[in-house]
Amino acid sequence: MHRRLIPYLILIFCFAGYVSGQELTIGLQSNRLLKDNPAGQTKGLADDPVELPFFDDFTGSSCLPSPHLWTDNFAFINNSYSDRQITIGIATLDALDETGKLYERATSDGFEADHLTSRPINLMYPASDNIRLSFWYEAGGLGDMPESADSLSLQFFAPDEAEWYSVWRSDALREPGFRPVIIRIDDPKYLKNGFQFRFVNRASLSDFQDNSMIGNCDHWNIDYVLLDRNRSEADTALADVAFRKPLRSILKTHEAMPWKQFRQVYLQEMGAFIPVSYRNNDVITRNVTRNFEIRDVYSNTIAHSFSAGATNIEPYASIDYNASLIYTFNTSNTDSALFRISCHLITDDFDPKTNDTLRYDQVFSNYFAFDDGTAESGYGINGEGSRNAMVAYRFKSFIDDTLRAISICFNDSYLNSNARAFDLMVWDDNKGLPGNVIYSFANVLVEPGDDINGFHTYILPDGVPVNDVFYVGWKQRSETFLNAGFDVNTPHRGRQFYWLNGIWYLSQKKGSLMIRPIVGKPVRTTSSDDENIPRHQERNRMWPNPANDFINIECEGLLPGPSAFISICDLQGRELIRTEYSERIDISQLKPGIYTVVALKGKKRLAWFRLVVTK
């Protein structure tokens, strides 16, 4: 080693030991899709038992298990937590309950978490009928890998005894991908009318001292559940050719972008292919025809359709196919557009038809997006030295435009511990890195969004002119993990940066930060007093403001009681007052300054206000 390098290496190692701030991703503390989709009603379903065959590949538009087959709603039906499934749609068992929140019984020592329980099934058949249950399962996937003490188990219900028995269990596996399991059911106590089976996972929370980093964990994915007669031990093959992955944007670099921006660069932004992924799950070679359609939703007309022809696919083969596309999005609308892309597989008549069609909505509105709208984890900077850390995401405006707002998906955090103030930031470009600050909005609050995707829109009152490359993001005011939404299954590497101790670093996390700049015309606000108040906030009020000794609060849905609280924090996020809710709150102990007042019902944040205290 050259002696001149030694002093520099010593400095580097010393510096590395001093700086412990780092970028991290964690599991979600809640699932907004489940929160916004309450459990469906099953009262209208017949009480008759399910007859064989019992089959579910978890394909469909709902994030809840089908009530025609399952009795509970703890599992999350999705296409997000794996990229190795054998058909589209999986059931994910994790540490979140049916409302999309962490189980109240969740601990780091381990606890019984989700159930996926079948409806009663008629299994009154002789053992000689060779009844078998098969399924495919995966540990972790694109979520959190279960720990060594975590497990997925299968239990059978004996109707006459009214007892559940464990018949299979898998500890955490480090090997990626799905594995098949097939189990024979020949015990007389199960061969009854009213038999049930259920999957149960055991989970354990990470033992973080920082509550803002506690989140969902220990994911297990299940696919293609089949219970039927006349099956052999080797009968894990499926007579089915099916799509494996959902459709994605067919733009080259964006998931969504403003329509007027796209029209300026459509030649370079329009993709030349529609990429699809499908698999032959059968033991024999199969033939498949691939058809495609693009529909202009606003005019309800077919804009383009074509067939990619027929081809053979070998047994157990997975095909990633790029269908050549000679077409450019076009419509008579001038400010926005929406196109629905459909892909359809034509296979043998005996194939299940629930998994042979894909649809994707290509959105052109007033925002740029690299994420697909669904967070699989949370992102942030945490640790000593991260108080002034910054996060920036690179975008490009192809025309002279005005940045009007920034939408950010902030995940719910355990005990609302990420309810901190931060500075909203916009930078210009400096040779591929964030450069000069061209706009900052100080002391805005982390606010989970009102809509299904969890985005909250921060309005920029005066607008910021942008052209070419610019960056949007935030500067922290504390070392608390802010927990922004992170889209793991739609990665766009090379666009995300973070700043620690004077240096910009390229993010090493695979995924897309869920932050979206809004450009064009001014964005309408719901209140002239505070551009960043949630949409429902106009039904809540606090007065007087400014105040010195007391404040009065009215909040929709909040009544005096043991679960109703008012929390008052400074702009660094430190909680200074926490008191049971009443219409009149004593603030005489507060020094002059600006504070955040949060109305809480249990762990749920109902409203927040910006308070100015004078003396």
Image (cartoon, helix red, strand yellow):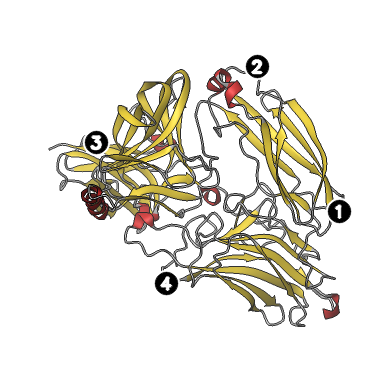
Residue 548 in the image: x percent, y percent?
17, 40
Q: Is residue 18 left or right of residue 222?
A: left
- The residues bearing labels 2 and 1 have C-alpha atoms spaced at a distance of 42 Å
Q: Is residue 131 left or right of residue 591?
A: right
Q: Amino acid at mark 2?
A: Ser
Q: Amino acid at mark 3?
A: Pro
Residues under numbered marks 4 and 2 in contact, where contact means CB atoms less than 8 Å apart: no
**Label ID, residue 350:** 1
**Label ID, residue 320:** none
> Which residue does the numbered mark 4 point to in the structure image?
109
Can the viewer see residue 174?
Answer: yes
Can the viewer see residue 75?
Answer: no
**Label ID, residue 332:** 2
Secondary element at tag 4:
loop
Residue 135, placed above or below residue 594: below
Residue in the picture at 45% in, 30% down: 395
Residue in the picture at 32% in, 58% down: 210
- The residues bearing labels 4 and 2 have C-alpha atoms spaced at a distance of 59 Å
Q: Earlier in the sequence, mark 2 or mark 3?
A: 2
